[in-house]
Amino acid sequence: MEQDRQLVVKSNHIIEASYRLSVAEQRVILSAITQVRRDQQKVTDEVLYSITAAELAELCGTDPKTAYRDLQNAAERLQTRRVTLHLEPDGVTIRSKRRRVTCWVQTVDYIDQEGRIELRFGKDILPYLTGLQREFTRYALSDVAKMTSAHGIRLYELLVQWPEGHRVVPLDDLRRWLQLEDRYPSIKDFKRWVLDPAVEQINEHSPLTVTWSQRKTGRKVTHLVFDYAPKKPPVAVGKAPARAAAKRKGSKYSDEDIARMALPGESWEAARARLNQLPLELA
Protein backbone atom coordinates (compact mmCIF):
# COMPACT_ATOMS: atom_id res chain seq x y z
CA MET A 1 0.00 0.00 0.00
CA GLU A 2 1.39 3.40 -0.99
CA GLN A 3 0.44 5.18 2.22
CA ASP A 4 2.23 8.45 1.48
CA ARG A 5 0.09 8.95 -1.63
CA GLN A 6 -3.22 8.46 0.18
CA LEU A 7 -4.61 11.94 0.66
CA VAL A 8 -7.70 12.81 2.66
CA VAL A 9 -9.44 15.80 1.07
CA LYS A 10 -12.56 17.25 2.68
CA SER A 11 -14.58 20.40 2.34
CA ASN A 12 -14.21 22.61 5.40
CA HIS A 13 -17.95 22.17 5.88
CA ILE A 14 -17.20 18.57 6.90
CA ILE A 15 -14.13 19.52 8.95
CA GLU A 16 -16.40 21.77 11.08
CA ALA A 17 -19.47 19.53 10.94
CA SER A 18 -21.03 18.02 14.05
CA TYR A 19 -20.56 14.27 14.27
CA ARG A 20 -19.06 11.56 16.41
CA LEU A 21 -17.37 8.45 15.01
CA SER A 22 -15.23 5.83 16.70
CA VAL A 23 -11.59 5.40 15.69
CA ALA A 24 -12.46 2.32 13.61
CA GLU A 25 -15.33 4.14 11.90
CA GLN A 26 -13.12 7.09 11.09
CA ARG A 27 -10.47 4.81 9.61
CA VAL A 28 -13.04 3.26 7.29
CA ILE A 29 -14.46 6.63 6.22
CA LEU A 30 -11.03 8.21 5.72
CA SER A 31 -9.76 5.19 3.76
CA ALA A 32 -12.75 5.49 1.43
CA ILE A 33 -12.27 9.26 1.05
CA THR A 34 -8.72 8.71 -0.21
CA GLN A 35 -10.17 6.74 -3.12
CA VAL A 36 -12.53 9.47 -4.32
CA ARG A 37 -11.49 10.67 -7.79
CA ARG A 38 -11.41 14.44 -7.59
CA ASP A 39 -9.94 14.82 -11.08
CA GLN A 40 -13.29 13.91 -12.60
CA GLN A 41 -15.93 16.57 -13.20
CA LYS A 42 -18.74 14.51 -11.72
CA VAL A 43 -18.58 11.58 -9.34
CA THR A 44 -21.93 9.87 -8.75
CA ASP A 45 -23.14 8.21 -5.58
CA GLU A 46 -23.17 4.87 -7.42
CA VAL A 47 -19.41 4.41 -7.05
CA LEU A 48 -18.35 1.70 -4.61
CA TYR A 49 -15.23 2.23 -2.48
CA SER A 50 -13.40 -0.86 -1.26
CA ILE A 51 -11.66 -1.24 2.12
CA THR A 52 -9.97 -4.45 3.25
CA ALA A 53 -8.98 -5.59 6.71
CA ALA A 54 -5.46 -6.34 5.44
CA GLU A 55 -5.06 -2.74 4.24
CA LEU A 56 -6.28 -1.33 7.54
CA ALA A 57 -3.97 -3.64 9.48
CA GLU A 58 -0.98 -2.48 7.43
CA LEU A 59 -1.96 1.17 7.64
CA CYS A 60 -2.66 1.25 11.37
CA GLY A 61 -0.11 -1.32 12.55
CA THR A 62 -2.75 -3.63 14.04
CA ASP A 63 -3.31 -7.38 13.96
CA PRO A 64 -5.20 -8.51 10.81
CA LYS A 65 -7.80 -10.42 12.87
CA THR A 66 -8.44 -7.34 14.99
CA ALA A 67 -8.61 -5.19 11.88
CA TYR A 68 -11.21 -7.52 10.32
CA ARG A 69 -13.36 -7.44 13.46
CA ASP A 70 -13.10 -3.64 13.63
CA LEU A 71 -13.94 -3.36 9.94
CA GLN A 72 -17.09 -5.46 10.34
CA ASN A 73 -18.26 -3.60 13.45
CA ALA A 74 -17.51 -0.18 11.99
CA ALA A 75 -19.37 -0.97 8.78
CA GLU A 76 -22.44 -2.07 10.74
CA ARG A 77 -22.52 1.13 12.81
CA LEU A 78 -21.84 3.47 9.89
CA GLN A 79 -25.32 2.70 8.61
CA THR A 80 -26.74 4.68 11.52
CA ARG A 81 -24.12 7.43 11.90
CA ARG A 82 -25.28 10.90 11.01
CA VAL A 83 -23.47 14.15 10.40
CA THR A 84 -24.82 17.68 10.82
CA LEU A 85 -23.47 20.19 8.31
CA HIS A 86 -23.66 23.87 9.21
CA LEU A 87 -24.20 25.72 5.94
CA GLU A 88 -24.01 29.41 5.09
CA PRO A 89 -27.16 31.30 4.01
CA ASP A 90 -28.09 30.84 0.36
CA GLY A 91 -28.96 34.50 -0.28
CA VAL A 92 -27.97 37.97 0.84
CA THR A 93 -31.37 38.67 2.38
CA ILE A 94 -31.45 35.37 4.28
CA ARG A 95 -29.84 35.75 7.69
CA SER A 96 -30.64 32.40 9.27
CA LYS A 97 -28.11 29.61 8.85
CA ARG A 98 -29.04 26.20 7.54
CA ARG A 99 -28.29 22.88 9.26
CA ARG A 100 -28.36 19.74 7.16
CA VAL A 101 -28.53 16.34 8.86
CA THR A 102 -27.51 13.46 6.62
CA CYS A 103 -25.85 10.04 6.62
CA TRP A 104 -22.25 9.20 5.81
CA VAL A 105 -23.03 6.11 3.74
CA GLN A 106 -26.08 4.73 1.96
CA THR A 107 -25.03 1.10 1.46
CA VAL A 108 -22.35 -1.31 2.66
CA ASP A 109 -21.60 -4.62 0.92
CA TYR A 110 -19.73 -7.39 2.75
CA ILE A 111 -17.37 -9.73 0.91
CA ASP A 112 -16.60 -12.12 3.74
CA GLN A 113 -14.28 -14.47 1.87
CA GLU A 114 -11.97 -11.55 1.06
CA GLY A 115 -12.18 -9.71 4.37
CA ARG A 116 -13.43 -6.67 2.48
CA ILE A 117 -16.31 -4.21 2.42
CA GLU A 118 -17.54 -1.89 -0.31
CA LEU A 119 -19.48 1.24 0.57
CA ARG A 120 -21.32 4.03 -1.19
CA PHE A 121 -21.20 7.53 0.24
CA GLY A 122 -24.48 9.30 0.85
CA LYS A 123 -25.72 11.52 -1.96
CA ASP A 124 -25.62 14.64 0.21
CA ILE A 125 -22.09 13.92 1.50
CA LEU A 126 -20.42 13.36 -1.87
CA PRO A 127 -20.37 17.04 -3.01
CA TYR A 128 -18.21 17.83 0.03
CA LEU A 129 -15.62 15.28 -1.09
CA THR A 130 -15.42 15.98 -4.84
CA GLY A 131 -14.91 18.95 -7.14
CA LEU A 132 -13.34 21.04 -4.39
CA GLN A 133 -11.69 24.19 -5.69
CA ARG A 134 -11.53 26.23 -2.47
CA GLU A 135 -12.20 26.01 1.26
CA PHE A 136 -11.01 22.46 1.69
CA THR A 137 -8.49 20.67 3.91
CA ARG A 138 -5.97 18.09 2.74
CA TYR A 139 -3.60 15.81 4.64
CA ALA A 140 -2.00 12.39 4.35
CA LEU A 141 -3.98 9.47 5.76
CA SER A 142 -0.78 8.21 7.39
CA ASP A 143 -0.76 11.38 9.56
CA VAL A 144 -3.64 10.00 11.66
CA ALA A 145 -3.64 6.27 10.85
CA LYS A 146 -2.02 5.14 14.10
CA MET A 147 -4.05 7.37 16.42
CA THR A 148 -6.25 5.60 18.94
CA SER A 149 -8.19 8.70 19.96
CA ALA A 150 -11.17 9.67 17.81
CA HIS A 151 -10.94 13.18 19.25
CA GLY A 152 -7.26 13.28 18.29
CA ILE A 153 -8.13 12.69 14.64
CA ARG A 154 -10.80 15.39 14.67
CA LEU A 155 -8.55 17.90 16.43
CA TYR A 156 -5.73 17.21 13.97
CA GLU A 157 -8.08 18.01 11.07
CA LEU A 158 -9.17 21.24 12.73
CA LEU A 159 -5.53 22.31 13.13
CA VAL A 160 -4.32 21.49 9.61
CA GLN A 161 -7.35 23.38 8.32
CA TRP A 162 -5.40 26.47 9.48
CA PRO A 163 -1.80 25.97 8.27
CA GLU A 164 -0.64 29.22 9.92
CA GLY A 165 0.35 27.25 13.03
CA HIS A 166 -1.99 29.10 15.40
CA ARG A 167 -5.70 28.67 15.96
CA VAL A 168 -8.08 30.02 18.58
CA VAL A 169 -11.13 27.77 18.98
CA PRO A 170 -14.24 28.76 20.94
CA LEU A 171 -14.84 25.97 23.45
CA ASP A 172 -18.56 25.85 22.63
CA ASP A 173 -17.74 25.35 18.94
CA LEU A 174 -15.36 22.50 19.71
CA ARG A 175 -17.99 20.81 21.88
CA ARG A 176 -20.51 21.16 19.05
CA TRP A 177 -18.14 19.82 16.38
CA LEU A 178 -17.38 16.77 18.54
CA GLN A 179 -21.03 16.37 19.60
CA LEU A 180 -20.07 16.72 23.25
CA GLU A 181 -22.42 19.54 24.19
CA ASP A 182 -23.92 17.59 27.10
CA ARG A 183 -20.83 15.57 28.09
CA TYR A 184 -17.96 16.61 30.35
CA PRO A 185 -19.58 19.90 31.45
CA SER A 186 -16.64 20.54 33.78
CA ILE A 187 -13.65 21.98 31.95
CA LYS A 188 -11.47 19.81 34.18
CA ASP A 189 -13.18 16.66 32.90
CA PHE A 190 -13.15 17.94 29.31
CA LYS A 191 -9.39 18.41 29.50
CA ARG A 192 -8.85 15.01 31.12
CA TRP A 193 -11.01 12.89 28.82
CA VAL A 194 -10.96 14.82 25.54
CA LEU A 195 -8.33 17.51 25.13
CA ASP A 196 -5.25 16.04 26.80
CA PRO A 197 -5.54 12.58 25.14
CA ALA A 198 -6.17 14.22 21.75
CA VAL A 199 -3.10 16.46 21.99
CA GLU A 200 -0.99 13.55 23.25
CA GLN A 201 -2.00 11.46 20.23
CA ILE A 202 -1.21 14.26 17.79
CA ASN A 203 2.21 14.78 19.35
CA GLU A 204 2.96 11.05 19.28
CA HIS A 205 1.64 9.97 15.90
CA SER A 206 1.26 12.98 13.58
CA PRO A 207 3.81 15.23 11.83
CA LEU A 208 2.87 18.09 14.18
CA THR A 209 3.95 19.20 17.64
CA VAL A 210 1.09 20.91 19.47
CA THR A 211 0.84 23.02 22.61
CA TRP A 212 -2.29 24.66 23.93
CA SER A 213 -3.52 27.19 26.47
CA GLN A 214 -6.88 28.55 27.52
CA ARG A 215 -8.59 31.93 27.60
CA LYS A 216 -11.24 33.03 30.03
CA THR A 217 -14.14 35.41 29.80
CA GLY A 218 -14.60 36.43 33.39
CA ARG A 219 -14.07 33.24 35.38
CA LYS A 220 -15.21 30.87 32.64
CA VAL A 221 -12.93 29.18 30.10
CA THR A 222 -14.36 30.16 26.71
CA HIS A 223 -11.54 29.63 24.19
CA LEU A 224 -8.69 27.20 23.57
CA VAL A 225 -5.51 28.43 21.90
CA PHE A 226 -3.46 25.96 19.86
CA ASP A 227 0.07 26.53 18.60
CA TYR A 228 1.60 23.90 16.36
CA ALA A 229 4.46 23.34 13.96
CA PRO A 230 6.02 20.49 11.98
CA LYS A 231 8.22 18.24 14.04
CA LYS A 232 11.86 19.06 13.55
CA PRO A 233 13.48 16.20 11.64
CA PRO A 234 16.96 14.89 12.41
CA VAL A 235 19.75 16.94 10.91
CA ALA A 236 20.67 15.30 7.62
CA VAL A 237 24.15 15.09 6.16
CA GLY A 238 24.95 16.28 2.65
CA LYS A 239 22.50 19.17 2.34
CA ALA A 240 25.08 21.72 1.24
CA PRO A 241 24.95 20.97 -2.53
CA ALA A 242 21.14 21.14 -2.60
CA ARG A 243 21.09 24.42 -0.70
CA ALA A 244 23.83 25.85 -2.88
CA ALA A 245 21.73 25.07 -5.93
CA ALA A 246 18.69 26.65 -4.30
CA LYS A 247 20.70 29.78 -3.51
CA ARG A 248 21.73 30.08 -7.13
CA LYS A 249 18.03 30.07 -8.00
CA GLY A 250 17.37 32.92 -5.57
CA SER A 251 15.81 30.79 -2.82
CA LYS A 252 17.13 30.03 0.66
CA TYR A 253 15.82 26.49 0.61
CA SER A 254 15.99 23.59 -1.78
CA ASP A 255 12.83 21.89 -3.04
CA GLU A 256 13.62 19.02 -0.68
CA ASP A 257 13.77 21.42 2.29
CA ILE A 258 10.44 22.98 1.34
CA ALA A 259 8.72 19.61 0.95
CA ARG A 260 10.06 18.55 4.35
CA MET A 261 9.13 21.72 6.25
CA ALA A 262 5.78 22.58 4.66
CA LEU A 263 2.82 22.60 7.02
CA PRO A 264 0.05 20.06 6.39
CA GLY A 265 -2.40 21.60 3.93
CA GLU A 266 0.02 24.40 2.94
CA SER A 267 0.51 25.07 -0.76
CA TRP A 268 3.97 24.87 -2.35
CA GLU A 269 4.02 28.63 -3.03
CA ALA A 270 2.89 29.56 0.48
CA ALA A 271 5.48 27.25 2.04
CA ARG A 272 8.30 28.72 -0.07
CA ALA A 273 7.28 32.29 0.80
CA ARG A 274 7.03 31.51 4.53
CA LEU A 275 10.34 29.63 4.72
CA ASN A 276 12.23 32.31 2.81
CA GLN A 277 11.45 34.63 5.72
CA LEU A 278 13.15 32.29 8.21
CA PRO A 279 16.86 32.09 9.03
CA LEU A 280 18.55 29.25 7.18
CA GLU A 281 19.69 27.73 10.47
CA LEU A 282 16.10 26.73 11.27
CA ALA A 283 15.99 24.21 8.41
Image (cartoon, rainbow, N blue to C red):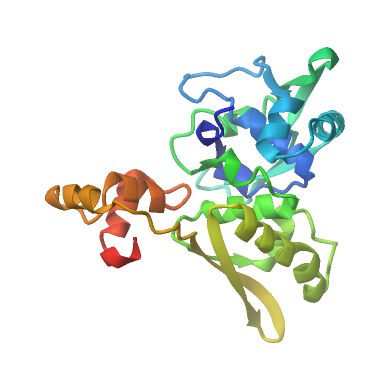
Any part of residue 146 in sight: yes
The residue furthest bottom is: 218
The residue furthest front is: 237
Q: Quadrant of the N terminus?
A: top right
Residue shown at 66%/35% (left/top)? 59
Residue shown at 81%/37% (left/top)? 81
Name the side, left or right, on which 109 lies relative to 235.
Answer: right
Q: Is residue 77 above or below residue 93?
A: above
Kindly indicate the quadrant of the structure image that contains residue 32. top right
Residue shown at 79%/31% (left/top)? 64
Q: Is residue 46 above or below residue 246?
A: above
Q: In this view, does 279 lie above or below 13?
A: below
Any part of residue 125 in sight: no
Q: Where is residue 68 in the image (x, y as percent from the top left)?
A: 82, 29
Q: Quadrant of the C terminus?
A: bottom left
Q: How many labels does the image show?
A: 0
Depth check: 21 or 209 in front?
A: 209
Residue shown at 55%/40% (left/top)? 11
Kindly indicate the quadrant of the structure image that contains residue 201. bottom right
Q: Position of residue 44 (x, y in %)?
A: 61, 17
Q: Is residue 3 above or below residue 232?
A: above
Q: Position of residue 123 (x, y in %)?
A: 68, 24
Depth check: 133 or 237 in front?
A: 237
Name the side, left or right, on which 217 lies relative to 24.
Answer: left
Q: Position of residue 155 (x, y in %)?
A: 64, 55
Name the side, left or right, on which 254 lies relative to 146.
Answer: left
